[in-house]
Amino acid sequence: MQNIPALWRDPETYLSRSAPDHPVLFFAPSVLHATAQRFLDGFSGLVTYAVKANAHPAVLSNLVAAGVNAFDVASPAEMAAVRGVSDTAVMHYNNPVRSAKEIAAGIDYGAASWSVDCASELDKLAAVPRSCEIAVRFALPVSGAAYDFGSKFGASPDDAVNLLRRVAVEGWTPSLCFHPGTQCEDADAWVEYIHAAKEIVDRAGAHIARMNVGGGFPAHRCGTAPDLEAQFAAIDAAVTHAFGATPPAILCEPGRAMVAESFTLAARIKGIRGAGETVFLNDGIYGGLVDIRDMGLPERVHVVAADGAWRKGRTVPRVVFGPTCDSLDRLPDGLPLAGDAEVGDFVLFPGLGAYSLAMTTAFNGYGVSEVVTVLDLLRDKTSNA
Ligand SMILES: *Cc1c(COP(=O)(O)O)cnc(C)c1O
């Protein structure tokens, strides 16, 4: 008999029935489908998914089911994860530094597109079939993102000109790619990159059929939800403005913005000290909350009592420690939590689907160990009196 996992109504129902003593990530496929549809409808090019943000098989298979059929992969293990859910999904191998064995694996998996940002790395790709696209990744010193991706990867515009010429001369399909940095709330970053791409194309005297505008689309962390459609429109306008009547096709590779909102993390309160100013959770920066260390505090956090009801007390600032014996295991900015929170309650962090499960460690025997599928992530508040 096939064992199909239960679909729980919402996180609160599961928490009140199961009282899990480990952190749980709640996954709502409905939310992932809606986000995928938003990208597919709103972005005027190919939508691919950056597997590193969350490689859970349920994420990958639901994206395929939603109509996403191309994936940005960085390692043979990510290629295997994609093949595990689809025989036909297209793979773009966009880690620009590769070992000989990894290149062989990419060829075996049939990676259709490869990015490169340096001549010595292009030298290594001699065996890659000439039917493939090679996208030259370039970087600019632009701001707008939570942190800069250009400090590790990406050729200078001058080097990109030379690489693009070489890709064309050696017989691959030349293309350009960039990544404006993760959680990029300022569409001007894309605009700058797109205009720089046009200059590189002109200086190289090459024709590119396609341009990869990267990931970096923001998730809902603070304030109102980001206006992705406005960013798509800014990208379209910049492509038209820069390239005129013969623009390259574009593709994007969102990770964070695609998957963040479809997961809510629940961590349990293990201990409260002093007059309540210090709280110990069963998850922290070595587990599912690692992204908070780098990205800062998200809003929308709430406390759920053991019976599933939301705590309604006025929030008070807390110092929040994770479960390990490492004193660095602390949320850097603390966290405001309901004043009536008690030991045994759960703290729910919405929007934590990206860089949570993917980066959780088992340090000290802790970390996210369960993904529970739910119909909906937000309980109807009227049933929560
Ligand atoms: C990480 C990464 C992405 C996804 O970035 P997000 O900020 O999560 O959207 C896309 N492309 C490449 C090449 C990456 O390394």
Image (cartoon, rainbow, N blue to C red):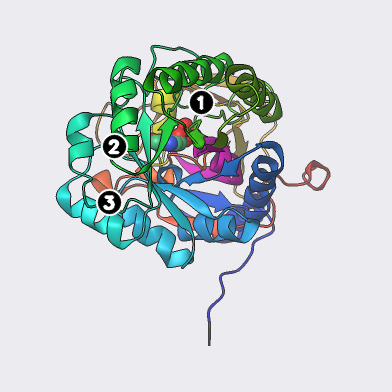
Q: Which mark is residue 183?
A: 1
Disc 1 residue crowd, few under 14, some 14–19, many 20+, Cα 10 Å: many
Residue under pointer 2? 96
Left or right: 129 as drawn, with respect to 59 = left
Q: Which mark is residue 128?
A: 3
Query: Looking at the image, is mark 2 or mark 3 nearer the viewer?
Result: 3
Upstream in the sequence, badge 2 or badge 1? Answer: 2
331 or 318, nearer to the observer = 331
Tell me where residue 287 appears, x and y as whole percent.
37, 41
What residue sits 55% from the left and 39% below the top? 260
Tell me where residue 56 appears, x and y as whole percent.
45, 55
Q: Secondary structure at mark 2?
A: loop
Distance between the Cα atoms at labels 2 and 3? 14 Å
Q: Mark 1 near ligand 1 (CB under 8 Å)?
A: yes
Disc 3 residue crowd, few under 14, some 14–19, many 20+, Cα 10 Å: many
Query: Looking at the image, is mark 3 or mark 1 nearer the viewer?
Result: 3
Please report the bounds of the magenta region as a residue range.
251-275
Of all residues, the one furthest to the bottom in this rendering is 1
Query: Looking at the image, is mark 2 or mark 1 nearer the viewer?
Result: 2
240 or 317, nearer to the observer = 240
Q: Secondary structure at mark 1?
A: loop
Distance between the Cα atoms at labels 3 and 1? 32 Å
Upstream in the sequence, badge 3 or badge 1? Answer: 3
Disc 2 residue crowd, few under 14, some 14–19, many 20+, Cα 10 Å: some
Tell me where residue 80 appears, x and y as whole percent.
35, 61
Q: Are marks 2 and 3 in contact (CB under 8 Å)?
A: no
Distance between the Cα atoms at labels 2 and 1? 21 Å
Amino acid type assigned to the residue bearing label 1 in the image: Gln
